[in-house]
Amino acid sequence: MIHEIEIKVLPSRLEDMVYIREQVYKSLKLKRDKKIDIKLIRQSIDARKGRPKYVLRLRVGVGEPAYIDADKLEIKYHKVSDSKQVIIVGAGPAGYFAALECLELGMKPIVLDRGKDVQARRRDLKAIQQDSIVNPESNYCFGEGGAGTYSDGKLYTRAKKRGKIIKSLKILVDHGASADILTDAHPHIGSNKLPKIIARMRQTILDHGGEVRFENKVTDLIINEGKCRGVVIGDSEELIADRVILATGHSARDIFKLLAEKKVRQEPKPFAIGLRIEHPQELIDEIQYDQLPREAGLPAASYKLVTQVEKVGVFSFCMCPGGLIVPAATAPGEIVVNGMSLSKRDSPFANSGIVTQISVEELQAKGYTGVFGNMDFQAEVERSVFDFGDGSQQAPAQNMIDFVSGQDMIEVNKSSYIPGVYRAPLHEILPSFVYERLKQGLTAFSLKMKGYFTNEANLVAVESRTSSTVKIPRDPKSCEHPEVTGLFPCGEGAGYAGGILSAAMDGQRVAQAIYSKYYGDLA
């Protein structure tokens, strides 16, 4: 018989299987001579009352094997060298997971990326960090693995279809991720481990007859009589295929402009903008766990905060416990910051985006109209933050107390941001309506987390690439653009995902939709 139960254990008991088995026997009121098989389904932390504990959801087989969903999942890839071709523009999570799904379905993926492979990409990241040199084709957003490679590796998603989530997680495990991501409530890989996993995914694509081409920037789409026939790479190279998946990410502004030139319909999309806030990790640990130092076996504490300011959302975004702030600009002349963590999450800093929602209607009322109104506003803020500085990738920062009070008196704290931060009046640099909402949001957060409002925290500008500012419409079933046959908008850049895992699942969905429409019914 199979049972599902929950037990709570102290961090010191998390690896003690003798103790856990004993708790299972007690919970199920079983005699000790009964044979049991235990599998972990879900692991989370409950720090709401008293000493923090791990909550373990277990599947227990009494007299028979237990299993988790991933145990039953078998993924088989076909050799596709001579199969029908699907061009995939972008080698981020949407693009790579679409490519792997193509292999399963017997289609040949040809993945094109403007940037470099993960290893070569590191040199360009070093140039941004140390020399303030931004390569517009290879940076924290562009290149193999996309923005997700260097944005912590968090695998949280609001998607409800657990089977599809498990498949995406299992693919990551099959390519080198820890099996813990299958059971953690908030799975995380780490930006130090993701590059090798991504490289193995690329090798799987190549081993089965697919293609992956780096420094192959798509400069045009070949569209004739409402049909997409392929793409143009660089100055003149044409690549022909009747199926093109557009998975270019939220920062590929040139692709949005190319679509506009080709009269391909797009829509402005709401997004969020704000700052990165950085606290000492020990302070967040003390607030969340009510202990200092945190107990051995507990991870660096995180938080999630949300409030409404005049019916508009203000919320924490991409919280990185034990993390680093990194420069995410994709072109010279702009400052953009993001957060990441390594797998151990052992930095002395905790950072998170603190952002406010920006609606299409709000910006239209301020004169930012048309398909690219939101994108123009986003770019304008990024340029204004850059122009305030010295022309480097140093980022303006302000002490949290100064920011909320609208002053510029207190020195900023040490920061994990390698290019460096300098004290600046962010309350004057940001658009006034953005500042006002962030100020009120932080004030509300200080009431929710005692100790959060402190002069030990910095705010760093500007967190602006939370999601795409443009949505590329597609048919809900076929995933095809409603006016351009053979063009399949996909992932975060097209407006259909919001993170690594949701982008991965959208890539799989689009590949399945192509197969169902053109080659056969998946059902």
Image (cartoon, grey):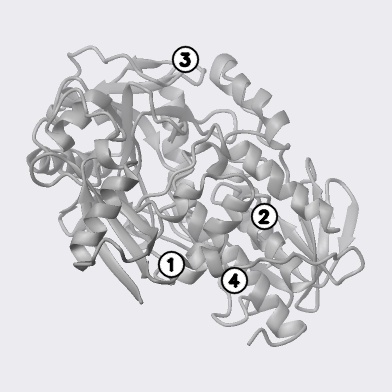
Residue at (52% x, 64% y) in the render: 70
Q: How many numbered markers are drawn?
A: 4
Give me the C-alpha separation between circle 4 and circle 1.
Answer: 30 Å
**Local SS, label 1:** loop
> What residue is pinned by disc 3?
390
Residue 405: horizontal and vertical position, in percent?
A: 12, 28
Q: Quadrant of the C terminus?
A: bottom right
Q: Earlier in the sequence, mark 4 or mark 2?
A: 2
Q: Quadrant of the N terminus?
A: bottom left
Q: Earlier in the sequence, mark 2 or mark 3?
A: 2
Residue 280 in view of the camera: no
Query: Which residue is nearer to you in this view: 172 or 180?
Result: 180
**Callouts 3 and 1 close, C-beta under 8 Å:** no
Q: Amino acid at mark 1?
A: Ala
Query: Which residue is nearer to you in this view: 408 or 197?
Result: 197
Within 10 Å of disc 4 (Cα), the crowding (few <14, some 14-19, many 20+) is many
